[in-house]
Image (cartoon, rainbow, N blue to C red):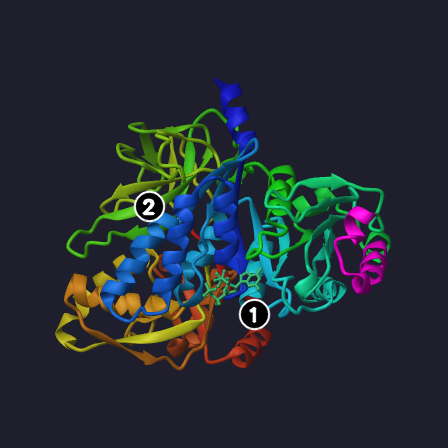
């Protein structure tokens, strides 16, 4: 029934929220779930936050990770749409998974603290989105507090991110007088009541709008809104979809303002599941046969079992419980006998997932990050990249006799995506790379508990890692010979250059122009 498939595809919106810690991601997530009727999950999100403060031992890490299985994917319905919100782990549990999750979404919501503007983590996550041309909606949060001037915030987004902005709404009042949002193109006000009903008006000066504000603030609001209408870019859906323009919404997640503007915008403007590029062809979401790729692996909470949960995004067709799939990397069949479907409402029993949906596939290590599943076709999705780690450490074994076992264990941890592994060409001890420090804690604890391998980490003298490629293979050989102590191979055997800092990286890039040094590597 291709029509049913096309309808399911057109209803789906799969997105993530990107932000710097404390900008309000958790609060906004809760409100989205609340409005989507998934109230019971809203509590789970909060629980996760509370644990984040006190994680120090293995059990708390496990608990955290266990809870994050629940919150990895949050599905809710609102209006005509099915939303899949994929969690991008934040705070200290910021990790490679945070980046990889962005490869499985079709749009992102960038939450900015209105008092702080663009912060470093937001910038990094934005860069990953840009790499994938992921369209971004901006939510300027905490307008109920002292904040920067909205025009200043728009300028900052344009300058720091080189991204055009189009304010779709404008805040009515500021800080204590903030009481709703004004829709600039529609001349409508989203109100102060619990349902945030929308009322059409003649303009910002209408009593229904200006009357919400104390006398002293009215004039300023009317002027500002008029200026925004006149001077700011109008929303251009095409520019948004290609990732060069972001529509901006103002609000307060805590006080429920602007949240519905955002959900409506996601339904109206965010793309339905997009076509995905594979090695042999581009796969349309509406293609009848099922395809999916794995973007995240989660180890089981029980350290005595090697069970893993692979999170796969469906790219086309229909994934059903019990279906036989082909694992592209090995060419072997794999029965999807117990896939987990994530629906926020527990009343709903589902056993079918459509493009844009994410399913959890329990397995014992068969599935790896980047794996493609099909109904038989030999194709491999190009989507899931590796991002150069920002923290590099040498692994020092407390018992030197167990070097071989350590190598195997690190290999497994790397396949699972816990860390990235680099084996130096000069035979010195392995180097692990992560983007978030908590990954090192998790690695250390898991090596001890699961493999009986107590390890320490030593600072490596490197802080930058780049994959190196060249059209002329011999040039790579020459480069590696000239940098014996500073080159290594990753899990796939691909060569990387390890530099002590950005300065020496630039220096070598200047000297070796035929060698490309990249911060991103696609899985293959
Ligand atoms: P995060 O997930 O991005 O880290 O942010 P989170 O939602 O946890 O929000 C960080 C803090 O900012 C929280 O306060 C939260 O209540 C507050 N906050 C979020 N949205 C708004 C908003 O629209 N307006 C205002 N005024 N505050 C907001 P906290 O005191 O750190 O935590 P809590 O004890 O209140 O949970």
Q: Is residue 379 left or right of residue 365?
A: right
Nearest the viewer among 40 and 48 is 40
Which residue position is annotated with label 1?
Answer: 120
- Give the Cα separation between the discs numbered 1 and 2: 30 Å
- What is the x, y in percent for residue 355? 48, 34
At horizontal 52% and vertical 43% (from top left) the residue drawn is 35
Q: Is residue 406 left or right of residue 35?
A: left
Which residue position is annotated with label 2?
Answer: 310
Mark 1 CB within 8 Å of ligand 1: no
Image quadrant where residue 268 sits: top right
Image quadrant where residue 445 sits: bottom left
Q: Are dots 1 and 2 in contact, CB under 8 Å?
A: no
Query: Depth-wise, is mark 1 or mark 2 nearer the camera?
Result: 1
Q: Element under label 2?
A: strand
Point out the stretch of residues depicted in magenta.
207-226
Count of numbered tags: 2
Q: Is residue 128 above or below residue 268?
A: below
Q: Earlier in the sequence, mark 1 or mark 2?
A: 1
Q: Is residue 524 visible?
A: no
At horizontal 53% and vertical 19% (from top left) the residue drawn is 3
Does residue 217 show up magenta in the picture? yes
- What is the x, y in percent for residue 288? 47, 24
Nearest the viewer among 282 and 272 is 272
User: Which residue of the protein is positioned furthest toward the top in this rendering?
Assistant: 1
Q: Is residue 38 above or below residue 89?
A: above
Q: Main secondary structure of the magenta part?
A: helix
Nearest the viewer among 31 and 195 is 195
Q: Is residue 446 above or below residue 267?
A: below
């Amino acid at each position: 029934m291709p029509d049913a498939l096309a309808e399911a595809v057109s209803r789906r919106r799969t997105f993530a929220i990107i932000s710097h810690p404390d900008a309000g991601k958790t609060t906004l997530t809760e409100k989205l779930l609340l409005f989507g009727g998934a109230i019971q999950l809203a509590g789970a999100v909060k629980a996760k936050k509370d644990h984040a403060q006190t994680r120090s031992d293995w059990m708390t890490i496990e608990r955290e990770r266990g809870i994050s299985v629940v919150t990895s994917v949050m599905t809710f319905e609102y209006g005509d749409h099915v939303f899949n919100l994929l969690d991008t782990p934040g705070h200290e549990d910021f990790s490679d998974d945070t980046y990889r999750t962005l490869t499985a979404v079709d749009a992102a919501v960038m939450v900015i603290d209105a008092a702080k503007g663009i912060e470093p983590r937001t910038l990094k996550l934005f860069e990953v989105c840009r790499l994938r041309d992921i369209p971004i909606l901006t939510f300027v949060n905490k307008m109920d507090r002292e904040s920067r001037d909205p025009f200043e915030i728009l300028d900052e987004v344009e300058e720091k991110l080189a991204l055009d902005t189009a304010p779709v709404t404008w805040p009515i009042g500021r800080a204590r007088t903030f009481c709703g949002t004004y829709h600039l193109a529609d001349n409508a006000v989203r109100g102060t009541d619990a349902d945030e009903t929308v009322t059409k008006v003649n303009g910002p000066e209408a009593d229904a709008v200006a009357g919400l504000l104390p006398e002293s603030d009215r004039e300023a609001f009317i002027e500002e809104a008029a200026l925004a209408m006149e001077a700011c870019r109008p929303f251009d859906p095409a520019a948004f979809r290609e990732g060069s323009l972001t529509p901006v919404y103002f609000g307060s997640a805590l006080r429920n303002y602007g949240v519905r503007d955002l959900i409506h915008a996601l339904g109206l403007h965010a793309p339905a599941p997009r076509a995905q590029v594979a090695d042999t062809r581009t796969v349309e979401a509406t293609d009848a046969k099922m395809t999916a790729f794995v973007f995240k692996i989660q180890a089981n909470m029980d350290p005595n079992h090697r069970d893993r949960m692979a999170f796969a995004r469906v790219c086309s067709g229909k994934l059903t419980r019990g279906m036989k799939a082909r694992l592209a990397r090995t060419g072997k069949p794999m029965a999807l006998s117990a896939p987990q479907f994530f629906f926020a409402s527990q009343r709903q029993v589902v056993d079918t997932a459509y493009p844009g949906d994410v399913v959890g596939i329990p397995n014992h290590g068969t599935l790896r990050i980047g794996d493609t599943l099909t109904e038989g076709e030999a194709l491999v999705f190009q989507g899931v990249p590796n991002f150069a780690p920002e923290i590099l450490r040498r692994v020092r074994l407390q018992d030197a006799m167990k070097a071989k076992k350590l190598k195997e264990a690190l290999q497994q941890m790397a396949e699972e995506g816990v860390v990235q592994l680099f084996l130096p060409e000069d035979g010195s001890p392995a180097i692990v790379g992560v983007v978030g420090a908590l990954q090192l804690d998790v690695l250390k604890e898991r090596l001890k508990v699961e493999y009986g391998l107590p390890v320490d980490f030593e600072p490596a003298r490197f802080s930058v890692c780049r994959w190196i490629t060249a059209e002329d293979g011999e040039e790579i050989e020459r480069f590696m010979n000239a940098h014996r102590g500073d080159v290594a191979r990753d899990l796939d055997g691909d060569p990387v250059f390890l530099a002590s800092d950005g300065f020496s990286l630039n220096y070598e890039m200047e000297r070796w122009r035929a060698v490309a040094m990249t911060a991103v590597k696609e899985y293959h």
